[in-house]
Every structure is written in structure tokens, then in C-alpha cells.
Image (spheres, helix red, strand yellow):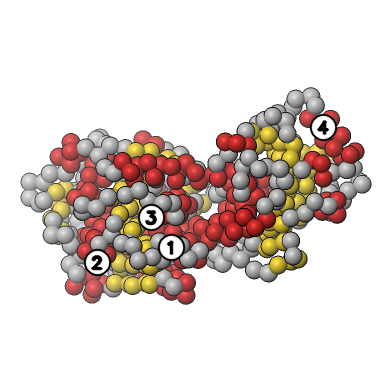
Amino acid sequence: MKNKHKFMLSVMALACLNPLNANAEIFSFDTRSSLNSDTLVLFQSADSTTYGIDLLPQSTQDQLNLATADNIFSGKQGETLEILVPSEIDAKRILLVGIGDAKILTPGSINTIGGNIAAKLDTVPQATVRIFTQGLTAAPLFAAELAHGIELRSYRYTQFKASTHKQKNYQIAVDDLSANQKRHKNLQAVEEGVFLARDLTNAPAGIMYPDSFANEARKLKSLGVKVTVLEAKDIERLQLGALAAVGKGSERPPKLVVAHWPGSKDAPIALVGKGITFDSGGYNIKATGTSIARMKSDMAGAATVLGTIKAMAIQKAAVNVVAIMPMAENMISGHAMIPGDVIKTAQGLTVEVLNTDAEGRLVLADGLWYAREHYNPSIIIDVATLTGSKVGALGSVYAGLFTDSETLVKELTYAGQQVDEKVWRLPLDQAYADELKSTIADLKNTGKEGSAGASSAAMFLKRFAGEQPWAHLDIAGNALTATDTAVVPAGATGYGVRLLSTWLTQPKTQ
């Protein structure tokens, strides 16, 4: 990063595989010369306060006031009003953006405002946008969170297409320059993690398989992350029988990838991510072409936890966190796992496989065991695109949260609310565990047909989670979006990186 002048900090150091189409800068100014821009953005709250309007010439202020006098613009969050401006300033337009009540804005809602600005101006041909945030003291660090939202929305996955986007330069004026720059630097680290997760999940399964995923993890060594990759022979030696069984149908063998950021001397927190790089369903093959085509994203849990490690490493967070990522392709072949097989997990429990499309919980079982046995963590959180049942219950708005820890419910719910990656607690109950009883093995890998599949899957995982606090995040439905949303263009979302990064850097009350 380089200072453009003594008041301005460039914040474009984002080393994702695919380019952003926005360059956001946070700086301080209060002179009329700062109005030299293609587009000016001002904010108005629900009480009709227009922030930064006093920096405009009086004639422009009068025009803006006339445009809002007939109550077509109330300052409600999500409203915008675009007007042409007089030639006495160089700007071609002013975009007035409603923020509602500034006192109740969360970081996530400010991110949304930023993302919506980026979306609205994406097709505007002019390149330079200046944004006034002076006076918004009721929403601390508004500029940093706004820039974060702009950059999150400006991500593009362009590896297989010619990009036609021209980069926009967003220059955001602030009152408290130092605090906003410091906050945005940390948010940029989180963006790096989000964009890594999006890149990995967007990549076709033909190029993103266990070995290539492991290679992406190895790149984090340059940041001080300790990366270990267990090969097929190691998986056999450690008797990770569930992971081996899921991956044995593929010509590309499974791996267990471990990425450890030892940012403190505390007992580690373990994040276990499901890493099925392609899920055909196995012999219980996916029913439709549309569903199977999305199954490159079945490794989104692993992408999320690896992205979180990258976010922690870049900001050198004072946390000891390790990501455990069991990686496999669930394919069909003469060697593949078949319905009715009985497999033995690393924990020693046997599992009757009634459905080869319920493979995620199998690889997670061995991942959870490995986390416990090799890292003795204080907390384990697993993340997985696990069940269609969760999508039926919560859709794509909330992730499903399963845990017996009231503390984790409180902390993860709060973190999710802050960044608008929301979680909703779903039940863990012995009745769902009873559905997993098998007559020939210790348990089955599915519950009753038509039952609460998300809860029975969570109860399966609980058998392998150990005694320390544990939570399961079912992000099925959250990992991909078919249409643009506020801070995510269509495609992979990177869901969970911001949630976990926020949670990890908050004080723990365990």
C-alpha cells in the first residue's frame, strides 16, 4: 500500500485470484477542491440530516434541498435519489443515499449500503466516485465498513471469461481518518479470506479437487500458517476409514488438509470444514441435472474455514486457530462405497451406509476426531453444506446452528447479526439420535425418511464431537447465490468467513 498524499491511504492491496472492479480509498478533506469527481455520494438519515452537504456550493445545496422537498426521498435505508448538478462543480451527478437511523446501524447494514452503492454505480461510465461521511459520528467507523461493503460487492470471478468491467475509484471522506484506516486494514484481511473462499468454491470441480485444494492451502505458508497435508497412505495409517470410504470411488485420492494459525499460546480453536470437491451422490446419485451441477460447491465448508485462517493470518490476529479439512470426491466407480456398506471411523465406531449421498457427515466424523486427538481444542466448530433439510427449514437467509452450548449460541448469533451472516438455532434431541440406530453397526448415516434430516445429521456429528464445546453450522443454501445480493455478486458467497472472523476476534466467555 502506498500513500497518495499525507491525508490519503490506498486500500486496494487485495491479492485474490480474480480482480475487483473497485478501488476504495479512505481519506480526509474539507475543501471545495475535493468536489472534483465524476459522482458525489451523500447520505441522509431518516431525520432529514444530510451529511456533508455543507461542503457543496450554496446553489448545489439549494438544488439538493429542492429535490427532496416534495417528500419523494425520506432518508429511509435503501432509498436513493440521483440528480444532475450545476456546472460550477466538476461532478456530473450526486447520489443521495438513505441510511435510516444512524444510531442503530450495524457493520453488516453499513456493508449493505456500500454494496448497494457499488451495484448502482457499476454501469455508470465515469470512473471516480467521492463519498462524504463527515458528521456520521453516530455510526463509528462508517467509512471503513462502507468501503468493506463496496469491495465485497466488487469481487468478480473472471478466470474463464474476458472481463469488461472498468475499475472504479471510490474515495471516502472521513472525520476520524486513523481509526477508519486501522479498521479497514483488518476488514481487508477478512476480504482476502472471503475472496479465497469464493475463488475456491466458484472453481469448477475439474480443476478444484483434493490435491489442487491442498496446493491452495500450501500458499498460506508465506503468511506464517502451518500447513500439513495427509496423503492417502497417511489416511490409511491413521485409520480414517470414513474419509477413505467416501473418497475411494475417485481416481483422485482423498486428503486431510490442516492449516494452523498459532497466533496465541491459548488452547486452539478448531474449525472443521466439509471438503467434498464434487458430490455426485455416489450410487444414490443426485436426482436432477440442476442439483448435480451445483455440487462443485460441496466443499464450501472447507473453503470457509481455510478463508478464515487466511483472514486471521493476514491481520496477525492473537488467536490460536486450526482448520481441519477432510477433502474427497464422492464419485461412482467399481471401487466406490455402495449402499449397505459398513465402514469404520477413526473413532472406532462403525457406520452402516444407507445412503451414499449422506457422505459429508462421514468425512466430518473423521475430521472431528482428528481435531480432538491431535489438537485438544478448547472449542470445535464444524462448517458444512450438509443437508437439503436445512434449506427447507431456513432457506438461504440463515445458516442452521446446532449446539448444546448456550455461550456459543449467544456468541455466534451476535457475530452473525453484526456482519449479516445470520444463524438460527435448530434442535439437537435424543429422538433424532435414536433414528440413527442400526441393527448391524454402531449407527446408520441417515435418519428416518421424511424426518428432520438436518437435526439427525447434527446428532450423527455429535457422536464424534467430544466433550469440549462444539457447534455445527449447516450452510447448505448459503454457499451459492443465483442472483446478486447486497455484498455478493451471483456465484459463491464465501459465507461464514466474516461470521467466524468476527467471532474469533471477539472476547470469549467460555
Say which of marks 4 and 3 sits in front.
Answer: 4
- Give the residue at the far right of this rendering: 88
Question: What's the mark number on residue 301?
Answer: 3
Q: Secondary structure at mark 2?
A: helix
> Which label's residue is closer to the chain start, 1 or 4?
4
Q: Which mark is residue 65?
A: 4
| Gap between marks 4 and 3 measured at Cα | 49 Å
Q: Which badge, 1 or 2, comes first in the chain's sequence?
A: 1
Res 159 seen here = no
Callouts 1 and 4 close, C-beta under 8 Å:
no
Q: In the figure, 160 relative to 43: above or below?
A: below
Q: Name which residue type carries label 3.
A: Gly
Label 4 residue SS? helix
**Which of the 4 image quadrants contains residue 51?**
top right
Left or right: residue 314 compared with residue 119: left
Q: State the residue at coordinates (82%, 35%).
A: 64
Q: How many marks?
A: 4
User: Callout 4, which amino acid?
Assistant: Asn
List the residue tagged with mark 2: 374
Mark 1 or mark 2: which is in front?
A: 1
Q: Earlier in the sequence, mark 2 or mark 3?
A: 3
Front residue of 83 and 415: 415
**Quadrant (top left/top right/bottom left/bottom right) for the N terminus:** bottom right
Residue at screen point 44% across, 59% down? 308
Q: CA distance from mark 3 to mark 1?
A: 23 Å
Do we see residue 10 in this rendering? Answer: yes
Please name the residue shown 23% across and 73% down the image. 234
* Horizontal arrangement in the rendering, residue 209 relative to residue 462 (left or right): right
Up/down of 379 relative to 45, above or below: below
Which residue is tagged 1?
318
